[in-house]
Image (tube, grey):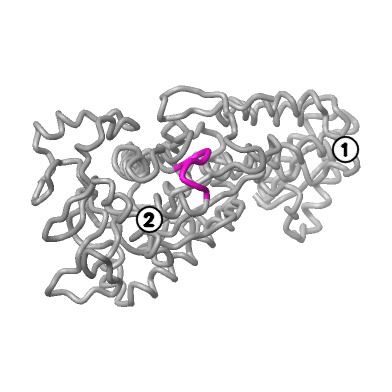
Amino acid sequence: MQLYLYDNWERQLRLFTPLRHDWIGLYCCGPTVYDYAHIGNLRTYLFEDLLRRTLEFNGHVVRHVINITDVGHLVSDADEGEDKMEKGSRKAGESAWDIAERFTVAFTSDLNSLNMLPPTIWCKATDHIAEQIDFIAAIEQKGFTYITSDGVYFDTSQQEDYGYLARLNRDGIEGGKRVELGEKKHATDFALWKFSPADEQRQMEWDSPWGRGFPGWHIECSAMASKYLEPWFDIHCGGEDHIAIHHSNEIAQNQACHGTRLANYWMHGYFLQIDAGKMSKSSGDFLRLQTLIDQQVDPLAYRFLCLSAHYRSQMNFSWDALEAAQTALGRLRDTYFALPEGGKADSSYVTRFHTEINQDLNVPKALVVMWEVLKSTLNDADKKATLNQFDRVLGLDLANWQPAVLTIPDEVQALAERRRLSRLNKNWAESDALRTEIQGLGYEVEDTAGGMHIRKA
């Protein structure tokens, strides 16, 4: 079955054609570990997990790489300001190395809570300083760099197609003077290596052929992606905010060094909106996954919520929508759990599901197929086997879910039994009255394919 993915380089759906027969290279820009990830960040990683699962559902072996940015990401994309790690260190009153470790652990814990597949390779920027220096030296040898008083810069004027991924209007940027140049020759030029300030002792700095300092943010991804996936691999992912600067600069570096645009497909997840505005750490109002957990929300309810919107559409977060997702997930789990084992996945439904996800990960339409299966005339065991196939992509971990052990009061059990007999006798008015009485005691009765279930309201 053919898989189509939206490639931001060509700005269109493209038939996915692997570059090699034995594995698919997938690089996903990881977090800058100066703070916790917010749920908007996590939406992007959920999209990338969905992509990986879809590739594997199509029979591919995926070599999945995620980087950890623990140095070099400045607070300004214009290469101004301090390193985010140094700033985070000062704010927390801990060393930059300690906060990097603490927030890396927190990030991986969030991924685990959301049932994301761990990458094949984790790679830290600070573990690959030598590779980044070598990459910069190769770019310098080919005439794409110049040196200022504060660092080594990439000269974007050497590339006619710089910024093609974002369709940048370089003349407009230069003419508008919207970026403070400083010693940069052009507004779009960017730092490859930053020199340590003479009057400041940095926690993270290294010797280099150009002087003591630290790498720029963009060079780490080019160096590590090329090392682990080769200079020309299949898919590079990130958030939509990476398109104009970070990913455009990665491409520029690789074109200069290796003559490739790094990846054959460039894919991006879109923002999570809250109150009609982008969720961001800089505003200080972002929500963590732990915030949802503290409100008695199952992390997989947030995963389910994200599955309800296409990854290339901006999704608005609301507590009402999250509550509805948790209710729907609970209904799905209860129904699935009650179904018997031993069935066989229905090929026609699996084909329909496969067709939808292969159209650029169209999970909202794939979920329609899932609910149709539950309402279908398939025997119950086959329904469960079919859902198992779907969950390879959805990642809701249905097979491992267990209902909480709930002690039902004798009074509620007696009412539920009376209601069951009323339904057998088709006394619907009495059945509805008993449901209302049970609800008044704080419990819900749900009729599923596997029978009647009682749970706390």
Q: Which residues are magenta?
A: 229-237
Residue at (28, 46) in percent of width and height? 142
Residue ID for mark 1: 381
Left or right: 400, with 235 as reference point: right
Q: Determine crowd level at label 2: few under 14, some 14-19, many 20+ residues with C-alpha closer than 10 A.
A: many
Left or right: 184, with 153 as reference point: left
Q: Quadrant of the N terminus?
A: top right
Q: Position of residue 384 (x, y in %)?
A: 81, 39
Q: Is residue 233 magenta?
A: yes
Front one among 262 and 440: 262
Disc 2 to disc 1, how far (Cα)? 49 Å
Q: Is residue 47 magenta?
A: no
Q: Position of residue 398 (x, y in %)?
A: 72, 47
Residue ID for mark 2: 220
Q: Amino acid at mark 2?
A: Glu
Front one among 114 and 415: 114
